[in-house]
Image: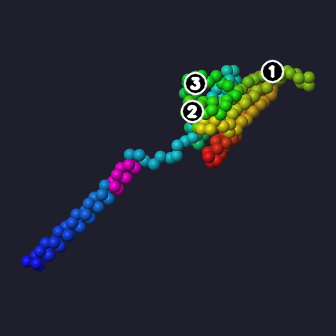
Amino acid sequence: MVGAESLSVGFYLRTDAITIMLLRLSFLVFFLSSLLLASAVNPQSPQRKVTLAVLDFGESRVGKVASDTLWASLKSAAQVNVIDREETRAAMKGIGYAGSLNLSRQEARSLGEAIGSDFYLIGDAQTLRRSSSTRPVYFESYASIFLVSSRTGRLITWQRPSFQASSAEDSEKQLIAELANDQNRTRNLAAILKTLEDR
């Protein structure tokens, strides 16, 4: 009788151990399956691209051409996601931004937040008729361009390319060519990437 009772107890102990082992194994299989399913449904995506907006550079014709040219140049860069021009204009209109370049840091942050970008470029571009005692009438086309961090409202960098020629058309062509070139795009991207590294 004692031997049969011991055998019965041993059998139950082994059964309990097997049950616990099977439960642990089931949990492990369930856990691994969940991980595989999650990675299949939501695969690891690359880091989010930095967003950049280019605002209009004033109301003049050359201002619109200059900002459109800069937008198109930056749009071709793989490192940033450049926000659509119409979306940017709608956001500017929505908060009543009228093109002022004299912004407090809070105003600059609010503007960036309304646009929904990490960085933005604001500025002004004009062609002016000039004259001096040393030379006949000439034309100067320039752009004042400011790169701003939306997160801090801080001015990251600025540039003021300027070109002179005997006709407005020629000076504007030089300005637009400068804004479209690879070196100008590289300068803007380098400033953005350096700011991200310094955070």
Question: Dots 3 and 1: beta carbons under 8 Å?
Answer: no
N-terminal of the pair, mark 2 or mark 3, is: 3
Instruction: Label 1: state its secondary structure.
Output: strand
Counting the numbered discs, the total is: 3
Q: Residue at x 55, y 23 (%)?
A: 94
Residue reaching furthest to the right: 133
Residue linked to disc 2:
113
Q: Is the residue marked by circle 1 packed among few (<14), some (14-19), or many (20+) residues within 10 Å?
A: some
Q: Nearer the viewer, mark 2 or mark 1?
A: 2
- Residue 163 visible in this rendered orientation of the protein: yes
Residue linked to disc 1:
129
Q: Quadrant of residue 121?
A: top right
Q: Disc 1 residue type?
A: Arg
Q: Position of residue 109 (x, y in %)?
A: 61, 33
Mark 2 to mark 1 CA distance (whole Å): 38 Å
In the image, which disc is placed on residue 177? none
Instruction: Label 2: state its secondary structure.
Output: helix
